[in-house]
Amino acid sequence: METLDLAIADGIAHVRMIRGEQLNTMVAAFWTEMIEVFEAIDARPDVRAVVLSSTGRHFTAGLDLAMASTSLRPASDDPARAREKLRRKILRMQETMSVVDRCRVPVIAVVQGGCIGGGVDLVTACDMRVGTADCYFTVQEINVGIVADVGTLQRLPYLLPQGLVRELAYTGRRFTAEEARQWGFLNRVADTPEAALEQAFALAREIAGKSPVAITGIKRVLDYGRGHSIEDGLDYVATWNAGMLIGDDLNVAVTAALAKKTADFKDLLE
């Protein structure tokens, strides 16, 4: 792959953006490779958590400007046809972030330096975020005169208060690690990229030690709660547990707890 690499060990998938010298800008290949990688992860029943990290000084500088310029060129003399094509392109780009959001297992982003534009779309699609003390986030789209359209404006309001979301989206200012930790956007803050990565892997290892059936269920139930009422969510989790609760993992967990041992859960089925 041109923009990513993938390693899987001990139940943890590690996805890295590898164009650090180019600030991990989101070139054309990124938008398809991210989908391919996360589809491969979902197909692996032994994967129980994902760490998404980057290389270089910055997590990502966002959408490649050359790609953005090409995307906005009219595809036809007919404005209706040109705009219909552009709409389909935007929807395909949204899928690149949504496949991360839909991942069967928790995804932990590790952020160093700048997380700009499309980077915010990406990390808001993750379950958790660990950052370095010098990292920052910028809803960059307003600074280039467009509306963020691949997930930030839809997911960020579930992670931060409305007033703060609107301030960040309207101004495009830097949202620092200190602020992000204060508002719960960052789960952990570390001094160095190496320490941030280790904290993310420690969190991933803890998750990987839990029942994979229960972890999958928790993620599905939490995600279902977005856009549904409390009553809808309660009904959904009742149905989920009616189908999934009676199984090996409950007995394994209880037996291990009584014996004061670490539970050893089987992988999911292929």
Image (cartoon, grey):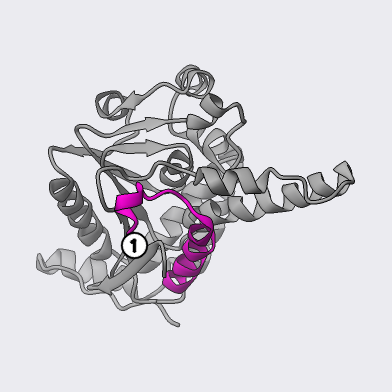
Instruction: Please tell me whether residue 76 is drawn above or below residue 257 in the rendered image.
Output: above
Identify the magenta region: 18-42
Quick one: 64 or 44, which is closer to the camera? 64
Count of picture labels: 1
The reply, left or right, for residue 89 in relation to residue 100 is right
Do we see residue 234 in this rendering?
Answer: no
Do we see residue 250 in this rendering?
Answer: yes
- As for residue 224 lying within the magenta part, the answer is no
Hey, which quadrant is residue 249 in on the image?
A: bottom left
Q: Residues within 10 Å of mark 1 (few under 14, many from 20)?
A: many
- Element type where label 1 sits in the image: strand
The reply, left or right, for residue 88 in relation to residue 150 is right
- As for residue 26 lying within the magenta part, the answer is yes
Image quarter (top left, top right, bottom left or bottom right) of the C terminus: bottom left
Residue 251, percent from left and from top: 29, 72
Instruction: Please tell me whether residue 160 is drawn above or below residue 116 in the rendered image.
Output: above
Residue 79, percent from left and from top: 86, 42
Residue 128, percent from left and from top: 34, 45
The reply, left or right, for residue 253 in relation to residue 222 is left
Quick one: 7 or 78, which is closer to the camera? 78
Residue bearing mark 1 = 15
Q: Amino acid at mark 1?
A: Val
Image quarter (top left, top right, bottom left or bottom right) of the N terminus: bottom left
Question: Residue, x 48% and y 58% (percent of image)?
Answer: 30
Question: Residue, x 37% and y 38% (percent of image)?
Answer: 115
Residue 236, percent from left and from top: 57, 52
Residue at the farthest left position: 260
Instruction: Please tell me whether residue 238 is drawn above or below residue 171 in the rendered image.
Output: below
| Prevalent SS, magenta region | helix
Hey, which quadrant is residue 207 in on the image?
A: bottom left
